[in-house]
Amino acid sequence: MERELAMEVVRVTELAALSAARWMGRGQKDSADGAATSAMRAMFDSVSVRGTVVIGEGEMDEAPMLYIGEQVGSGVGPEVDIAVDPLEGTELVAKGLDNAIAVIAMADKGNLLHAPDMYMEKLAVGPALAGKLSLSNSLQTNLHLAAEYLNKPLDTLTVLILDRERHEEHIDILRNMGVRIKLISDGDVAGAIAPAMEESGIDLYVGSGGAPEGVLAAAALRCLGGDFMGRLLPANQSEYERCIAMGIDNPHRILSITDLVGNEDVIFAATGITSGDFLEGVHYLDHQRAKTHSLVMRASTRTIRFVEATHYLPNKPLPEQ
């Protein structure tokens, strides 16, 4: 992949964010998601790749655009796998809450895992803990190891986890061990990236969330020098067979970051829709302008760029419902 692709990709997330932000706080998550998806798909036509969506909005029969298997890009350039989440945090946008983002990951063809739409157990850490922890350990063991490698007391560790009923046991363990917990309502990708962003103050991300979001987070952590492990959690025989059909021969095995995003180059881009821990949301200015704040990274160079852009916006009304 050419380095110029990184800036082409960030333009795609910018347009998705601008389109979704118009629905912020309106309580219409599907409309926001649809706007982001339509904008992202349209902008992909200008990107110099022959891309295949391996993680998208669903199958062709349930998603009219950016579906799994859809071909995107200009048709000229390298063959790549593409993972997208045009609006990560639909509820966040609908309610006007923080940490909604538009996200893309891109890698050479054959490198991104075709992750089925089901839960995945996750463990995400920053560079200081890369290669030091494992999902094969108990949560207690991983916490003790993290404290040892980070050279800090257990009660100063901060662990991020989704605020879900399924995480009650995890939360009890964390509290009994005296670590600090940050609960989030949504935003699985941003949450898993947080341990690799020094300004977040997060040491580990644990718990379960969507498997497709796990691949996107793993792509970001590859670029940041962090680490990610996942284990699929098929809920029934149908989901188990879905894993087999998608080429995952042992759905219960621990997946390393290499299993998820390969060991070649990866590009990751995200644009804030609502403000969060490391990205500002879309800010509307006077004279029909808006400002976006994006993050774009490459694994091969470990280059991390924050991009601020000001966009002119035609004065278009929201679509009729």
Image: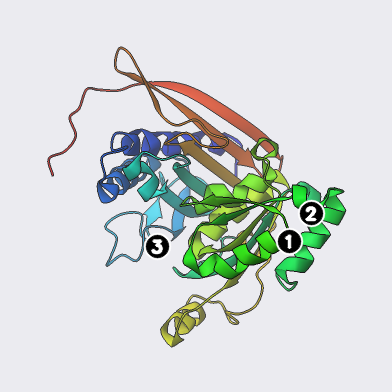
Circles 1 and 3 in contact, beta carbons < 8 Å: no
How many discs mark residues in the rendered view?
3
Between marks 2 and 3 in the image, the one whose residue lies nearer the viewer: 2
- For mark 1, what is the residue? 177
Q: Tell me the distance, in whole angstroms, between the alpha carbons under discs 1 and 2.
A: 7 Å
Q: Residue at x 28, y 38 (%)?
A: 23
- For mark 3, what is the residue? 68
Label whose residue precedes the other's in the sequence (1 or 2): 2
Picture quarter containing residue 16?
A: top left
Q: Quadrant of the N terminus?
A: top right
Q: Is residue 306 left or right of residue 13?
A: right
- For mark 2, what is the residue? 154
Tell me the SS state at disc 3: loop
Q: Position of residue 183 (x, y in %)?
A: 55, 52
Between marks 1 and 3 in the image, the one whose residue lies nearer the viewer: 1
Which kind of residue does numbered mark 1 sit on?
Met
Circles 1 and 2 in contact, beta carbons < 8 Å: yes
Q: How many residues crowd mark 1 within 10 Å: few (<14), some (14–19), many (20+)?
A: some
Q: In this orientation, does residue 54 appear?
A: yes
Tell me the SS state at disc 1: loop
Tell me the SS state at disc 2: helix
Which kind of residue does numbered mark 2 sit on?
Leu
Q: Tell me the distance, in whole angstroms, between the alpha carbons under discs 2 and 3.
A: 42 Å
Q: Residue at x 51, y 24 (%)?
A: 308
Q: Tell me the distance, in whole angstroms, between the alpha carbons under discs 1 and 3.
A: 42 Å
Q: How many residues crowd mark 2 within 10 Å: few (<14), some (14–19), many (20+)?
A: some
Label whose residue precedes the other's in the sequence (2 or 3): 3
Which kind of residue does numbered mark 3 sit on?
Ile
Q: How many residues crowd mark 3 within 10 Å: few (<14), some (14–19), many (20+)?
A: many
